Amino acid sequence: MDQRKGTILHTALHLAAAPGRLVRHPLTHLFHRYYKEKSFARTLFVIDIILVATIIVLTSVFTYLLFRSASITDQVVIDATVAPTEIVSGSASTLIFRYENQSDEELRNARLALTFPAHFERLEEASGADEHSAQVFDLGTIAPDAHGQIKIRGVMFGDVGGDQLFASSLSFTYGERNALATKKSEHSFRPERSTLALELRLPERLVAGQEVSGQIVYKNTGEINFPEISIEPVWPADFTLISSDPSLANGNFRLRALAAGEEGVMEFRGRLPGMESIDFSFHPSFTFGEDRYKQETLSQTVTLLPSQLTARAEPTSAVLTPGGMIEVNILYEHTGEFAIENATVTISSDPSVFTKDVVTTIGSLAPGATGEITVSVPIIARPIINTTSIKTTTSYILEGTTDTISVVTDRDSIKITTPVVLEAFARYSSPQGDQLGRGPLPPIVGEETKYWIFLTVRSTTNAINNVHLDADLGPGVSFTGKQSVSVGEQLTYLAESNSIEWKIPSIDPTVRDGVVSVAFEVAIVPTEAMLGKTPTLVSGPFVRGQDAFTGAQVIGRGVTITTNLPYDAMAAGLGIVE
C-alpha cells in the first residue's frame, strides 16, 4: 500500500497527471442531468457551452476596459485654491488651478478647459500655459508624476454667502492606442463680504411722527470699478415714504456704476411711525441686466422719542366752500419732558386746496403747557377734488439742540362743495369757419341778424341735483326756437319774461368727463336807439342746484353776451349797429 495516498503531495501529483478531471467532471454531470435524454444532446450541449464562454469573455473585456479607463482619471488630480483666502465680492483675487498626473501613463495632447461663473471679470491673462484663449489651455504632454498650475486673476461679483462655481475639464490621450479620457471637476468658492459699503445717516434725535430726511451713503471700498448698483429698501412698519432721489423703480433704487474708491448718496424723506423704536433695512446688489447679486445688508435699529408737542385742528365747518374761507381752531399741548423752543404750528391741506399754508408762532413752551389759537384759511376757487384733509405740522427745537423737529398729524377727510363755472358766449361762425348765424354784419337798424348762444357748465367735482339754468334775452332779441342740449330735456322759452329756462333732475361731475352745454339761436332787429352801440343778446345767465355730495346750494354765473364777438373769425370787429 502506498503510504503517500491521501496526502497533499499525492493529490497535487494526481491533478497534475490528469488536470482535465476538474473541468470534465462538472461538465459530465451537467450533460447527464439536463441534456442526455434530448435529441441532438451533444450538439445542444456544445452550443450552450460556447455561448456561455463568449458571454464570460466579453464581460471580462468590458470590465477590464471600464476599470482601466476609470483608474487613469482617478489618478489625475485637479484642485483649485484662491488668494487671498477670504473672498470679497467685487474685489480682485487670484485663482490657482493645479493639475497633477499621478499615474504611470504619459498624458498626451492635454487640454484644460475652465468654465467661469456668470459675470466673473478676468483682469489679466492667465499664466502657466504655452498657449491659451479665454478658457482653454494647451498643456501639451504631462509626464508621470508631473504637475503644473494655471493662475487667473479676476473679480467675483457674486452673492455674499453664496457659492461661485468654477468647472474644469482636462482631456488627454494615453497608452499605445491613444485612448481618450477626460477628467472633470467642480470648484466652489464663497464670497464672505463685499466691497460695497452702505451707511445710513439720520438726524441725531428722532421723534415719533416726525417728517425726517435721511441719506444712504454707498461706497466702493475696493480697487475695481463697480457695475450698476440697486438697493432694495425695507422700511419700518407704518413708515411713509414721501420722496426720494432717485425715485423707486419696481421697489428698488437703481444707482449708477461706481468707480473704485468713489461714493454716492441716495436721499429720502418720509414720516416716522408713532412707536418707540423702528428698524431700517437696505439690501444692496450688483446688477447686470436682469441678474442681481446680493451684497451685505445694512440693518439699523433707531430709537424714537415721543412727540413733545401735539396739536389738533378743529375746523368750524364740516364743508369747504371754493373761493371762501374756513376758520380752524388749533389746540396744542406740550406732552413731553423736555423744554422746547421756536415752536410753530402750520395748517395746510393734503391734497392742496388752501391758497397758502397758515403758520402760527408759539415760541417757547415748558412741559405741560397748553393753548388754543383760531386761524382763517383761504380756499382756492376751483379745486379739482371733492375731499381733502387738514394737515397740522408742529415744528420745534429741543432745548439745548439745534435741529428742528417737525411732526405731522392728519385729520379725517373734509368735504369740498363743487365749484360751478358757467361759460357764456355767442357765435356767428364755428371755430372751423362754418357760418352759423344769418343776416348782416355789422347789424343794421331794421334788419334781422341771427346768432347762436352757448351756455356751458364746467369744472364741477360733484353731481348736482335739481339743476335750473336761466338766461334773460336782451331788448329787441327773440328766441327762434332752434336749440341743442347735451343732456336732459329741451330748454323752454318764457315769452312773458323774454327768457330761456332749462331744468333737469341732475348732472354728473364735469371736471374730468367733459361739459354740460345748451345752445340756442336768437335774432335781433336793431332799433334807431341802438345805432352806434353793441346791443345785449343775453344778460344775467346763471345756473343753480344742490351739491349731491355736501348738500350745499351752488350757483354759477355767466357774463353778459353782446354782439361784440372778438374771437369769432367772421364777426370780430363787426358788433356795432349801423
Image (cartoon, helix red, strand yellow):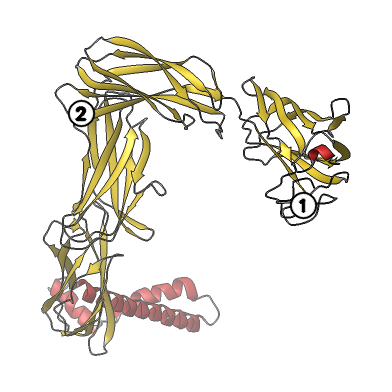
In this rendered view, identify the residue nearer to me: 174 or 550.
550
User: Is residue 46 rendered to the left or right of residue 282?
Assistant: right
Task: Say which residue label 2 marks.
Answer: 205
Q: x, y percentage for residue 153?
A: 17, 69
Residue visible at 32% across and 30% down?
272
| Amino acid type, callout 1 | Ser
Occupied quadrant, residue 269: top left
Q: Secondary structure at mark 1?
A: loop
Question: Local crowd at mark 2 within 10 Å, few (<14), some, or many (≥20)?
Answer: some
Occupied quadrant, residue 556: top right
Question: Local crowd at mark 1 within 10 Å, few (<14), some, or many (≥20)?
Answer: some
In this rendered view, identify the residue nearer to me: 335 or 332.
332
User: Is residue 107 rendered to the left or right of residue 284?
Assistant: left
Q: x, y percentage for residue 261?
A: 16, 58
Instruction: Check residue 72 in the rendering and tell me which mark sits there, or answer none.
Output: none
| Amino acid type, callout 2 | Arg
Q: Are marks 2 and 1 in contact (CB under 8 Å)?
A: no
Q: x, y percentage for residue 350?
A: 45, 30
Task: Say which residue label 1 marks.
Answer: 429
Q: Is residue 182 above or below residue 261?
A: below
